[in-house]
Image: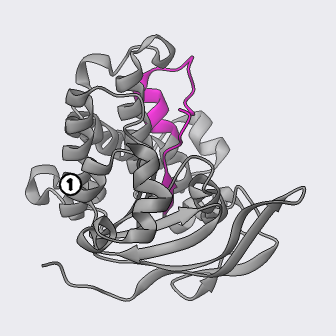
């Protein structure tokens, strides 16, 4: 049994509307360290909207979001990334004209200390810094088993491989919290098993296997997962939050959610 720590993110009475349509309605929940939290619900329940509020893409009309005690309710997405909030997207958002290596490397720019001039000259500290960042990127490529496509243009890759590249780009930010929005959508069984394995390995950390890449060595012990495959959710999640029509209708362990009559009626029944 994993130990439970205090909340990394606290969401209080969050409401979000689009021209009168309520996407989120008075949602409150804690995102804790040392656990995988799954957010489930029917299509249109507000799951992606919740992630968009957490990392600054949407600005809620009501409520507050606190990250380690700091109010981030209206933070800019780039500042959220610098704080350690990284995510993947329901619809893949990659630079389709760039290679796998360049897409993952692009995420490292928020961690670089050199300025534009020193980077352009590519000399001294700037060169040494890029070499160090590239080592981490190469470790991520090795970890996700995408070495054969490292120099291939992302736009030409199969869907499942592009999903891995997007996960790699999120890892390259060295996140403290990893937000995964349907990372297995559209995949076959084998591809889902691979992504599930990667998520577990990211959560647990790889120790000395990837000594130079802190994100792989130490792991990411706070993961939020949006997923429709209930078998995957029940296997991976420590805790589950259920949304329906923008409202939180249930929260608990997989066993508690599996037997909750309200959840079965509102969600599980719709999935059958």
Looking at this rendering, what residue extends furthest in the top direction? 156
Name the quadrant of the N terminus.
bottom left
Color encoding of the figure: one colour
Residue 107 against residue 100 in the figure, above or below = below
Residue for point 39% across, 14% down: 152
Residue 261 belongs to the span the image colors magenta: no
SS of the residue under disc 1 = helix
Q: Is residue 226 visible?
A: no
> Residue 31: horizontal and vertical position, in percent?
44, 76
Viewer-nearest residue: 84 or 163: 163
Residue 117 against residue 113 in the figure, above or below = above
> Residue 91: horizontal and vertical position, in percent?
56, 34
Residue 69 against residue 19 in the figure, above or below = below
Q: Quadrant of residue 104?
A: top left
Viewer-nearest residue: 189 or 32: 189
> Residue 252: horizontal and vertical position, in percent?
35, 77
Name the quadrant of the C terminus.
top left
Residue for point 82% across, 72% down: 61
Q: Quadrant of residue 217?
A: bottom left
Q: Quadrant of residue 13?
A: bottom right
- Report the magenta residues as a range: 85-106
Residue for point 35% across, 25% down: 160
In this rendering, would 35 be left or right of 72? left
Label 1: how many residues lie within 10 Å, few (<14), some (14-19) or many (20+)?
some
Residue 103 belongs to the span the image colors magenta: yes
Viewer-nearest residue: 259 or 217: 259
Residue that badge 1 annotates: 200
**Total number of numbered discs in the rendering:** 1
Looking at this rendering, what residue extends furthest in the left direction? 208
């Amino acid at each position: 049994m994993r130990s439970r720590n205090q909340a990394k993110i606290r969401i209080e009475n969050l409401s979000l509307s689009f021209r009168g349509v309520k996407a989120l309605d008075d949602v409150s929940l804690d995102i804790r360290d040392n656990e995988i939290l799954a957010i489930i619900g029917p299509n249109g329940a507000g799951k992606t909207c919740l992630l968009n509020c957490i990392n600054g893409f949407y600005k809620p009309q009501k409520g507050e979001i606190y990250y380690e005690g700091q109010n981030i309710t209206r933070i800019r997405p780039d500042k959220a990334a610098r704080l350690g909030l990284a995510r993947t997207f329901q619809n893949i958002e990659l630079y389709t004209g760039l290679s796998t290596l360049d897409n993952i490397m692009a995420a490292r720019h928020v961690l670089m200390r050199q300025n534009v001039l020193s980077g352009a000259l590519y000399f001294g500290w700037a060169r040494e810094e890029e070499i160090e960042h590239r080592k981490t990127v190469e470790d991520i490529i090795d970890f996700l088993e995408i070495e054969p496509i490292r120099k291939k243009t992302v736009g030409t890759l199969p869907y499942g491989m592009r999903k891995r590249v997007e996960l790699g780009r999120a890892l390259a930010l060295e996140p403290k919290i990893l937000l995964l929005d349907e990372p297995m959508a559209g995949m076959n069984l084998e591809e889902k098993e691979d992504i599930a394995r990667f998520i577990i390995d990211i959560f647990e950390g790889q120790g000395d296997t990837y000594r130079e890449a802190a994100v792989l060595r130490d792991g990411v012990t706070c993961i939020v997962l949006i997923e429709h495959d209930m078998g995957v959710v029940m296997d991976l999640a420590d805790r589950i939050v259920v949304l329906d029509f923008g409202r939180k209708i249930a929260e608990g362990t997989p066993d508690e959610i599996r037997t909750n009559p309200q959840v079965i009626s509102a969600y599980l029944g719709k999935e059958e």
